[in-house]
Amino acid sequence: MKIILSRKGFDSSPENGGVPSPILPSGAMYSLPIPERASHYATYARCYGDIRMGEYTAGKFAADLTRNRIQAADRAHLDPDLNAASIARPEGWRPLFGQEHAAESHLRNQGIEAGDVFLFYGWFREVEVQREAFRYRRGARDLHVLFGWLQVESRYPSSDILRLPSWTQTHPHYQSKAHKHNSIYLAADRLKLRGVATDLPGAGVFSHYRDALCLTAKGASRSIWQLPEWLHPEGKASSLSYHGNPLLWTKQEGSVRLKSVAKGQEFVLDCDHFPEATEWLEQLIHSPYAAGQFRVQNVPV
């Protein structure tokens, strides 16, 4: 099995949101999908105001936090699509993730296939409510935080995308099916670890912030990560992809610091070389704040 740390959601580029996703005072957190820029997909893409995030919508968060630069009527690139409760779902729906261009080429070169697990992370900051609007809490830190996961049941490259069920046709990477470096990853029903099916869902979201989900080291900029000590590549047959330079890693007592690189969206870890990763993954998903139920029946599209 391989684990892929996959950066998604709003980032610092204005065309990709330009602000962090919110962590609410309750600890609930929501990854805001980037705006949809592909004009050919605009008629299929969901509006931010249509995407439920707890008792609010992505439109409310996006409008408040960007000071109306992004509004509820704007279209969102809803990918990865992990939460059954975010929009009305057709019968048989299950989570999906798509990737294309250089990032998809990297996944192919790394041999990503059925059974591998994406761990999605993004840029988050704590918010508060001021005059009925969400604003970033003064002094709140910028953090890289894990927000969801997806174990691959099947990968559909562009040549096979037409084999997907009809309900996938509104996904942005279905609309990009003509691009040769484009794939859609369909979630497994149940998480399988060490070749054995567990009682854990194959995909879902981490609904509330907790320290175990935070990659960013205390007191550091968001791209300086504090990770379990077993992730240090010294003496291993491989390293987290794009992070083979030993100068990026600093050993500490009981942990390791990593200066994560800006290059790439997908960082791949081979669990054959890091067997501790499987238990780490299982502990993350076992949390009561990991929501992953996605069996949906007879729900109107």
Image (tube, rainbow, N blue to C red):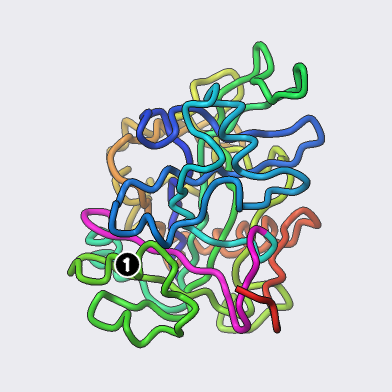
Asked if residue 262 lies left or right of residue 148, the reply is left
Identify residue type, mark 1. Gln
- On the question of residue 226 being in view, the answer is no
Q: Quadrant of the C terminus?
A: bottom right
- On the question of residue 156 being in view, the answer is yes
- Please tell me which residue is depicted at 52% across the width and 35% down the height of the picture: 71
Task: Determine the image quadrant of residue 229.
Answer: top right
Q: Position of residue 126 (x, y in %)?
A: 67, 26
In the displayed image of the protein, which residue is found farthest to the bottom?
Answer: 163
- Please tell me which residue is depicted at 34% across the width and 78% down the height of the picture: 156
| Above or below 220: residue 250 | below
Q: Name the residue under label 1.
A: 175
Task: Determine the image quadrant of residue 128.
Answer: top right
- Please tell me which residue is depicted at 67% across the width and 12% down the height of the picture: 138
Whether residue 177 appears in magenta in the rendering, the answer is no
User: In this view of the protein, which residue sits in the foreground, 196 or 180?
Assistant: 180
First to last magenta residue range: 86-103
Q: Where is residue 10 in the image (x, y as percent from the top left)?
A: 47, 38
Q: Position of residue 139 (x, y in %)?
A: 65, 12
In the displayed image of the protein, which residue is found farthest to the left?
Answer: 180
User: In this view of the protein, which residue sits in the foreground, 271 or 54?
Assistant: 54
Question: Considering the numbered disc 1 on the image, is that residue within a helix, a strand or a loop?
Answer: helix
- Please tell me which residue is depicted at 48% across the width and 48% down the height of the picture: 231
Disc 1 crowd rating (10 Å Cα; few below 14, some 14-19, many 20+) is: some
User: In this view of the protein, which residue sits in the foreground, 178 or 240?
Assistant: 178
Q: Position of residue 4 (x, y in %)?
A: 43, 58
Numbered label tally: 1
Asked if residue 147 lies left or right of residue 121, the reply is right
Whether residue 96 appears in magenta in the rendering, the answer is yes
